[in-house]
Image: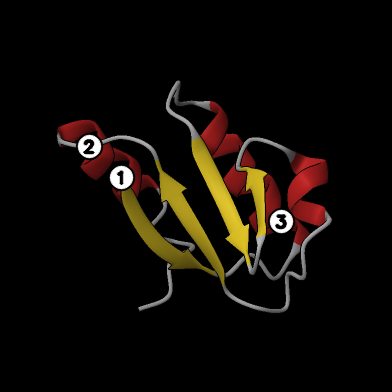
Amino acid sequence: MKEFIVSLNSVDKVKRFVSVTAGFDTEIDVVSGRYVIDGKSFMGIFSMDLSKPLLVRVHENGEQAEQIMKMFQEFTLT
């Protein structure tokens, strides 16, 4: 499993993020506090406090996980 922090503080970012996640068969979760939401769910992500950074969990290892993480670079906080 890979984890990283993202910022989804606009409607456009959420749309792009969900569009990227939908392209993978891998489970991708978005975590805020004790809430875990499917990263492919517009409604789920919009139910979170988007003013705060969110944790993303990619349930994949190896080369595919690295490819997925590269796709999310525009959203990650460094």
The residue pinned by badge 3 equals: 12
Q: Amino acid at mark 2?
A: Asn
Instruction: Quarter of the image for the N terminus: give it.
Output: top left
- Circle on res. 61: 2
Callout 2: helix, strand or loop? Answer: loop
Task: Label 1: state its secondary structure.
Answer: loop
Residue 1's label in the rendered image is 1
- Left or right: where does residue 23 sit relative to residue 10? left
Residue at x-position 45% and y-position 26%: 24
- Distance (Cα) linking label 1 and label 3: 27 Å
Sequence-earlier tag: 2 or 1: 1
| Residue 60 in picture, x, y percent from top left | 30, 35
Decide: is 51 above or below 15: below
Q: Amino acid at mark 3?
A: Asp
Q: Which mark is residue 19?
A: none
Q: Residues within 10 Å of mark 3 (few under 14, many from 20)?
A: few
Q: Are marks 2 and 1 in contact (CB under 8 Å)?
A: yes
From mark 2 to mark 1, how far is it between C-alphas?
A: 6 Å
Looking at the image, is 38 positioned above or below residue 45? above
Q: Earlier in the sequence, mark 3 or mark 2?
A: 3
Observer-side mark, 3 or 2, equals 2
Q: Residue at x 49, y 26 (%)?
A: 23
Residue that protrudes farthest toward the front in the picture: 34
Please count the marks in the image.
3
Return the residue nearer the eye: 14 or 61.
61
